[in-house]
């Protein structure tokens, strides 16, 4: 099982921009873009901070996904 971080989905649901979120997190817009496109995963500390900023539980930001290899078994 791998974990998907759903920050991009929550930002869209709330009508927030990557720029706004980057300012709140103290990160670059590029870093947030990498998180949103799931090219890079945020640290656990950043996930906890994001949940506070976005007002959602950590569980809403993380989704368990079966690995591709598990689907092929």
Image (cartoon, grey):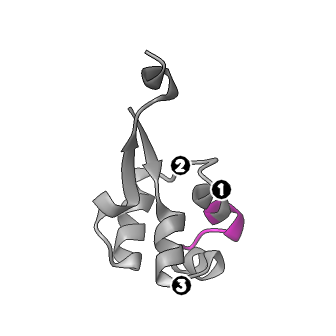
Judged by depth in the image, the label closer to the viewer, 2 or 3, is: 3
* Label ID, residue 41: 2
Q: Main secondary structure of the magenta part?
A: helix
| Residue under numbered circle 3 | 15
Counting residues from the start of the chain, the first of labels 2 and 1 encountered is 1
Report how far apart the C-alphas of labels 2 and 1 lie in the structure: 8 Å
Image coordinates of residue 61 in percent, x first then y, are 39, 60
Q: Is disc 2 placed on a helix, strand or loop?
A: loop
Residue 61 position (above or below residue 17): above
Q: Is residue 14 magenta?
A: no
Residue positioned 46% across, 71% down in the render: 10
Q: Is disc 3 placed on a helix, strand or loop?
A: loop
Q: Which residues are magenta?
A: 25-32
Residue 16 position (above or below residue 4): below
Residue positioned 48% across, 19% down in the render: 72
Counting residues from the start of the chain, the first of labels 3 and 1 encountered is 3
């Amino acid at each position: 099982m791998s974990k998907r971080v759903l920050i991009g989905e929550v930002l869209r649901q709330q009508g927030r921009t990557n720029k706004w979120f980057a300012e709140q997190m103290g990160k670059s817009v590029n870093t947030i873009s990498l998180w949103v496109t799931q090219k890079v995963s945020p640290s656990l500390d950043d996930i906890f901070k994001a949940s506070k900023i976005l007002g959602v539980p950590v569980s809403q930001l993380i989704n368990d996904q079966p690995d591709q290899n598990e689907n092929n078994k």
